[in-house]
Amino acid sequence: MQPSSPERAIIAIGPWLDTPAGAYVRAWQQAQLDALTADIFGFNAMQIGLPQIDALQANRMPHRWLTDTHVPHADDERARKRIVVVHDFAELPFASQSLDLIVLPHVLEFASEPHQVLREVERVLIPEGHVIICGFNPASLWGLRQITGKVTRKHFLPLEGEFISVPRLKDWLKLLNMEVNQGHFGCYAPPCLTDKWLNRFGFMEKVGDRWWPYLGAVYIVHAIKRIRGMRLIGPVWSKQKAKAAKGVPATNRIHKK
């Protein structure tokens, strides 16, 4: 299935991940995704977009798929083999309530219809299904650099991206009955262009995580789809108690204290 209007902005972030700053982000996200997805169980898991990141490599579900808006270039043979469906992210070609886990690595901020993408994700997730979202944090040094880049025309990240704050994302998820389970911020180094300077600011990872944890350049949010009206059923009474109560009028079931 070919997308009706390819998300060119999402495609643009792929080459950026090969830059020193992109490799820095990719390494942090890969470690976090491995830790998050390792203990999520079920049958069907799907990563939407960005084949440069293998978001499901640590997951143990029997069926794990990768979809994208386009087929990668011939020189990226590994990504070509992993992609099973090409489609528009606003129209997921999967049955309702058919997937246990969906990962969205930098999809919403580069999608032309992020709300519709989330609505589709909610539709195809089973009750108590999981969604993991990666994004750039506008309340960070990288977010500030992106704003100034639009003025100076010296862009640090792909220009087409629209950063989505974590509070705003939580509001969107809440409207779709998705409960945020946990979140992580990372990549506290300033927006440097070279490995040399990124390594020099490596100490900021531990410092930032402790003293300004919400100012990391990127975040990962893990949410669970909840269904209103559902509740867990408690244990059934034992047969002995049920037999003793049988045939006794409710008004006569008086227990001595």
Image (cartoon, rainbow, N blue to C red):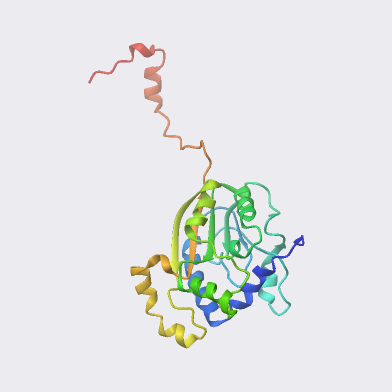
50 left or right of 183 in image = right
Task: Give the vertical position of 232 relative to 85 (above or below).
Answer: above
3 left or right of 241 in image = right
Closer to the camera, 138 or 9?
Answer: 138
Closer to the camera, 127 or 209?
Answer: 209
Identified at 70% across, 65% down, the residue is 69
Q: Residue furthest left?
A: 257
Examine the rendering and report whether any part of residue 241 can be seen: yes
Quarter placement of the N terminus: bottom right
202 left or right of 5 in image = left
Identified at 38% across, 66% down, the residue is 213
Identified at 38% across, 14% down, the residue is 250
The image position of residue 194, as x and y in percent, is 51, 86
Quarter placement of the C terminus: top left
The image position of residue 249, as x and y in percent, is 39, 11
12 left or right of 190 in image = right
The image position of residue 42, as x and y in percent, is 55, 53
Q: How many marks?
A: 0
